[in-house]
Image (cartoon, helix red, strand yellow):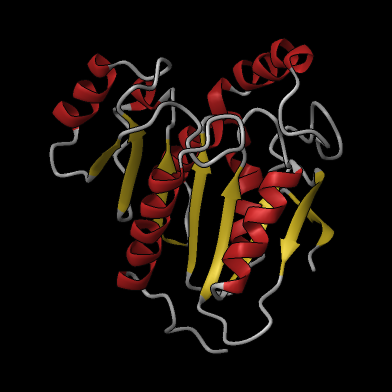
Amino acid sequence: MGETVRLGSARDGFEFEAYRAPVADARRGGLVVCHAIWGVTPHLRALAESYAEAGYETLVPSLFGRLQPGFTERDTDPALMARQNGYAKETAWGAEVLDVVQAAIDALAPPVFALGFCFGGTVAWLAAARCSGLSAVASFYGGQIVQYLEDAPGVPIILHLGKTDPLIPPADIEAIRDRHPDLPVYLYEAGHAFVAPNGYHADSARLSRLRTLALFARNGAGRAEV
């Protein structure tokens, strides 16, 4: 089972909580999971456990720790949406929390990978461009990536997007492809949040996970000392 740990930002010493899921057997690498606007929910913690079972020591840092200490206990609550969206905007859709992501990366032995969902999908994109110590990144339905197209990923990255996602219109997808034509962009027969309980689509969740694990395997997973 996982545990709550505290990490510190090298930028200003700020301490924040993160959920850590350790591996029980052979370690393939470290993984930083960037959460959606709902925070470090039970779903994200369960997901961290599933990646730990696959051999990835996983950290899910509280990206809103400066604005809302602690974890969110419910996956989705409409009454929280305005506040959580406000947090996302206040952090410039993740650009202002990369010190938290970097601290999580630095807390893990290499190779270290990252993935993120929705708000966290944009954070993952920015981390691929601006953070150090990552080997590969997977971004799931990052709605604000289009605002950061000038950020060129410095590590291999793949994007997972839903064909019927109302939050990421076709024009945004085309803008991403036009700016980064060599970037693997996978489209699924699903809407937004197809990995999460509120938008879950089994086939898309399964295939995107397989592609993500394959990306990690191609970029160093399993080469670290156990």
**Residue 47: quadrant of the picture:** bottom right
Q: Is residue 118 left or right of residue 137?
A: right
| Picture residue at 61% right of the left edge, 37% below the top | 197
Q: Is residue 194 left or right of residue 51?
A: left
Instruction: Count the numbered circles shown.
Output: 0
Q: Position of residue 104 (x, y in %)?
A: 65, 56
Residue 6 to residue 160: above or below: below
Q: Position of residue 195 (x, y in %)?
A: 51, 42
| Pick the front one: 177 or 110 | 177
Residue 26 to residue 153: above or below: below
Q: Is residue 105 left or right of residue 167?
A: right
Q: Position of residue 28 (x, y in %)?
A: 50, 78
Extreme front residue here?
A: 202
| Picture residue at 80% right of the left edge, 68% below the top | 1
| Picture residue at 76% right of the left edge, 55% below the top | 19
Residue 83 to residue 128: above or below: above
| Pick the front one: 188 or 146 | 188
Q: Is residue 10 visible?
A: no
Q: Quadrant of the C terminus?
A: bottom right
Q: Is residue 5 visible?
A: yes
Q: Position of residue 181 (x, y in %)?
A: 13, 37
